[in-house]
Image (spheres, rainbow, N blue to C red):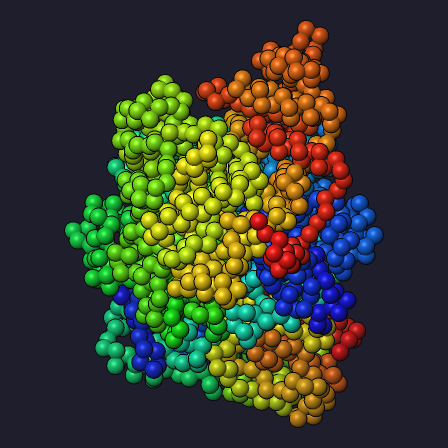
Amino acid sequence: MSDTTALLVLEDGRTFEGKAYGATGQTLGEIVFNTGMTGYQETLTDPSYHRQIVVMTAPHIGNTGVNDEDNESRQIWVAGYVVRDPSRRSSNWRAQRTLDEDLETQGIVGISGIDTRQLTRILREGVMRAGIFSGDALAPVAELVERVKGGAEMSGAHLADEVSVPDAYTIEPAAGVDEVAHVVAVDLGIKAMTPEMMAQRGIRVTVVPSTWTAEQILDAKPDGVFFSNGPGDPSAAEQPVQTLRRVLDAKVPFFGICFGNQLLGRALGYGTYKLPFGHRGINQPVMDRTTGKVEITAHNHGFAVDAPLDGDSVSPAGYGRVKVSHVCLNDDVVEGLECLDIPAFSVQYHPEAAAGPHDAAYLFDRFVSVMKGERR
Amino acid sequence: MPKRDDINSVLVIGSGPIVIGQACEFDYSGTQACRVLKSEGVRVVLLNSNPATIMTDPEFADATYVEPITTEVIESIIAKERPDALLPTLGGQTALNAAIDAHAEGILDKYGVELIGANLEAINLGENRELFKGVVERCGADSAASRICHTMDECLAAAEELNYPVVVRPSFTMGGLGSGFAYDAEDLRRIAGAGLHYSPTTEVLLEESILGWKEYELELMRDKHDNVVVVCSIENVDPVGVHTGDSITVAPAMTLTDREYQRMRDVGIAIIREVGVDTGGCNVQFAVEPDTGRLIVIEMNPRVSRSSALASKATGFPIAKIAARLAIGYTLDEIPNDITGSTPASFEPTLDYVVVKVPRFAFEKFPAADPVLTTTMKSVGEAMAIGRNFTEALGKALRSIDKKGMNFHWDGEFPTGDAVEELLKAVTVPTEKRFIQVQQLLRAVRAGHCDMEAVYEACRIDPWFLDQMLVMNEVAHEVAHAAELDAPLLREAKSHGLADAQIAALRGVPIEDVYALRAELGVQPIFKTVDTCAAEFEARTPYHYSSYDAETEVAPREREAVLILGSGPNRIGQGIEFDYSCVHAALSLKDRYETVMVNCNPETVSTDYDTANRLYFEPLTFEDVMAVYEAEKAAGPVKGMFVQLGGQTPLSLAQRLADAGVPILGTSPEAIDNAEDRAAFGRVLEAAGVPAPAYGTAHGIDEAIEIAERITYPVLVRPSYVLGGRGMEIVYDREQLEDYGTRMADVGDHATDAPLLIDRFLDDAIEIDVDALYDGTDLYLGGVMEHIEEAGIHSGDSACVLPPVTLSLDELERIRRSTQALAEGIGVRGLMNVQYALVSDVLYVLEANPRASRTVPFVAKATGVPLASAAALVMTGSTIAQLKADGVLPEIDAASIDMSQRVAVKEAVLPFKRFRTHEGLVVDSVLGPEMRSTGEVMGFDETFPLAFAKSQAAAFGGLPTEGKAFVSVADRDKRSIVFPVARLHALGFEILATEGTAQVLGRHGIPTSVVRKHSEGRGPTGEPTIVDLVNAGEVPLVINTPSGQGARADGYEIRAAATAADAAIVTTTQQLAAAVLAIEALRKGPFDVLSLQDAAGARARNVIAGNMA
């Protein structure tokens, strides 16, 4: 492991001294914590973490190394990485490289050896901006705090275009599965497991850049449209909301995950707001209010939809009745929306998991049913 | 969906005596269940034969039956109490099997009792191996290839198909009893033979070997709405081949990617659903092939298990408590998470720390036992430690084990050359010592004298864990070779788990110097919180662990604190009985003080975060205890610390803690020394005018011989400063004493330079155990127990009776006076235990211990007096007079006998069946001065014979009332057996004896058949020997007293066979007399049962009626 000193500096002036991990240098971003005990590789490559410095609450990171199969996108997206005890040895039959190597190659500035629990206890009072500095980037703390404050805020940030693929591509139904539908999936920061889950169910998925217009989407004559997860503030995503409204107007079945859920909320005329410290972990209890059952789910969201929890409400934007279908049992945050008069639904959490439990995979089946007209 | 309104009364069955594989974790789970049910307004009826448990304290249930866990007793209780439901899933395999039997006999149907927490179909699917394989298959997962067998021929044929080695697993046994690896047909005959015997369904499973694979365990819970959560993942550091109870384990799993973990989780959830555990917990064990990732399901337990207790303590998620709520109808989302108070129980705990569990073994107690670890559990206890990283947790766990030679060391040079080769060979075989051997090998790896791959190939411990241990060696190397110990290096060493003692050894300085240096440099641990959620939400429960990290979370407080030191890992001689006293202290002082528990045993009630106000899960060593003390002193006022309740472990810290300024509550360290130091104790005895057997302290065997000849043989000899009679032997002559000296020199687990204590051994004495309370003025005699066996058998292994059945009131008064004089002379403030021997009307003091004793809970159950709670109050300043006035203690004590008082018999439970010699025979079951029992039961009834009969039924399955009785006794016992054997004959037993004994019996007119001795072999026409008959299960009662003069091996084969065949075995003449009376009582019909609460009511009425002697 590295012996280079690194400094984590919070916007409020608090600092943590540790060792450089991954690349040395400087990185700035919103600092958030993730409580998952497994799945660091998936987390690092999840585009939703774009521009965020991620703190892992699990102390040992890197134990199983890195392999080529578990990446959720083409690169590591986190702006910076904060861990307590990076592993110096990978042990797993699928490991191809150490995590340290990947972080370094991809220029991800990280810090290790700090009290991540203390940091988490600070961050649960409210997220803030932070920076990691090591090597030549080190400077007097006052100056580092200024640099942190000069970094971008997450509120108001439109980031989907920065993480989306440049060109559309298609994922065929999994081998041996008959095609049941064609879906246009708008990549706002999509994770690889999402089209994979669809393909397993016979869906042919065309993943398209976030810049695709409603005409382009509808011209593809899809059986359904999907909006993915992704980074940024939903209130800054005006263009995708307009696109989505056109899809809803066309009564094409719609399914959204995470950012896609927030966009559906906005398209339906509800507001979105920033959570105090967000949900980032793979142990979150969500109740499916239709069945009364609890599912353990993967979360990664700093924003949420502001829709009425009690009873059905009517879409302020004129899309009929809407029900909050899922709710987080920890804090009653809206975790899913279901339109009762048009074929559209979405969830705030991650049924594709990766990392995380598979309890909510049924939602992909539900999407198929909606497209087949078996249910709304 | 709230709780069911049709369940108003529940029968809870506990797990009975502490045995290997089923220890006090079931007191923890049962206590939680009782608490929950009571708080829900459900009437709790409890059955448990173990008096040492907290759950059997009368306040935890509405009707508490300390009775044998048998079908008849269950029926009697059900008939009397008419519960609506039976909850069998929190009392281990014992409770589950008892419930299955009760159902099979139609008792549950007859009285309309519903089984809750699990259904029989689920139990069967989970525990029947063949059916379970079907479950696994339906879940789309793999099992190891296997064959079910019911006969030895089937076993041999199946093994040919599967190829050796094969794993043998008997159905429906606990703790892996009877299972093992068979490398060839001979092994198979031995292991599968035993397995077929132990399995209640005469069924074993033979399986392809998955030795050396990685092993994992998931703890799951499911509610009636089919919500499932995985509470915890546990990874075994030892690969497959070692029972998970004997493995070093870590939580959470350390070497799985998310994909692999989620696959395991999916399979686990599919299994709990398919098996149909609808309300409660289960665990599923997995094996993973390290090179391919192939996942195999090993087994599941459809109930709360030992691992559930570990998982509960590791995560802060109270599995048993939640299981009890689920059983009465709640769903997971309706139950709050205690720790956060704001989130529901329907989530999965996430850890921001690492938990390591290390088993504690007792092979030194069974020198003949094969020390190889197998799939049969052999450890007697465990310690758990929490750290912010693996090395910190591992270091803490290893020092929690509190056993010499069982921690990493860097003594001498690292191994090279042949030593490396030898170690590489040694670590291929799992034993208690393997972990230390691996660490030594890693010293060679660090120095470049051995290849890491070679170590992995030899021991198959995952390379990630090996690397972590290598880190510890590297840090140790730095510590040893640094010019000076500066703060960063010291901090590095501490954060990788190195104890002050290890650092001191590495630097060649006294341990005190390391402690002082840390204080000077400010290298001190801080305390984090176990909060189930990795700090995502605020924790309300102060459940702490130390770490060398930055921020501490100990909250300031106003109330004065009392710190209670627990007893550490269970071991023979120091177990649940001591935890009982610690728990009582915490509960009784909660109203007056902030109680703070310090302990490292995950199985216990004391380490339930609900027990004390604050819990510190920490090793019980000086540095760790001091850190807690300093943290609590910084948080608010501290009244002091209890070191006298947790047994020898905390007691041994007393002086150092006092020297460091810790106020010790109750009996002072000086007073403790008065009792421990032979010379000081001699002066106390003299001043008190109480005689003791002649004794001496010897340094070396020559001096021992000198002393022995002065005080005359027989003598009792033992090393000083031991617990549980470790190394204690009765020696009859010089030759034997010399032999003892030679053997003790070879025993590595205690300092060979410790002085030897030599006492004149009082043959044929009546031994008496006394538990008393002293406040400086008044003595309260809690209980006087008369041993049933003669002197010379460790008090922990001896059955005893309360009230004493042969002592006169005058003798009781003498005991009272002597005890008071001793308490005064020693300076006791709180509990004291005294052992007396009564010989020819002289009352000798054998031992006095100014601390809680093993018998405190038994006394409390038998008399209904909360002795341990009262002790805690006395230790914090209450007087006995006050406690009597407040009604905590009754006016009269054990010096008066209530003539109508029920009689309580405590019987020890011994683990001989678990321990096999290398040849596969059970180790010798003869009792001696070294304690070897793991647990105890209580028989409670109106007369001694009935109480004794119940104690035997609870401990061993009971005495036979008819059939063959085999008698073979030492010459000196021949006279005293005549009458009881004549009585057995009159009761209809057929008497068998070997020639010598048969002659004696024959001359007394007792018809006796002569059978062949084992040494004579079978007769010319195949006449069986006695061992053959016992093996064949034809002799339900074996009476065999070994001769005292070194010929103890004589009856070994007979006793071993009797133990293995579950025949009742009597090894002393006193036991024989009691057994004959008990058999007579048994023939009069089934037991009557009476709850402790009803017994207390009767007692109170008696006192009012003045019915006292």
Q: Quadrant of the N terminus of chain B?
A: bottom right
Q: Nearer the viewer, residue A341 or B486?
A: B486
On the rendered structure, is A164 left or right of A195?
A: left
Q: Is residue B830 visible?
A: no
Residue furthest toward the left?
B483
Which residue appears at 55% of the width and 76% of the height? B342
Residue B1007 is situated, as x and y percent measured from the top left of the image, at 71, 16
Q: Quadrant of residue B333?
A: bottom right
* Residue B892 visible to the viewer: yes
Residue A340 image offset from top left, x and y in percent: 74, 83
Q: Position of residue B364 (x, y in %)?
A: 43, 34
Residue B22: percent from left, percent from top: 58, 46
- The residue lying toward the viewer, choosing from B436 and B868, is B868
Q: Is B107 positioned to the left or the right of B783 in the image?
A: right
Q: Between B442 and A95, which is closer to the camera in this rendering?
A: B442
- Residue at 73 percent of width and 27 percent of height: B987
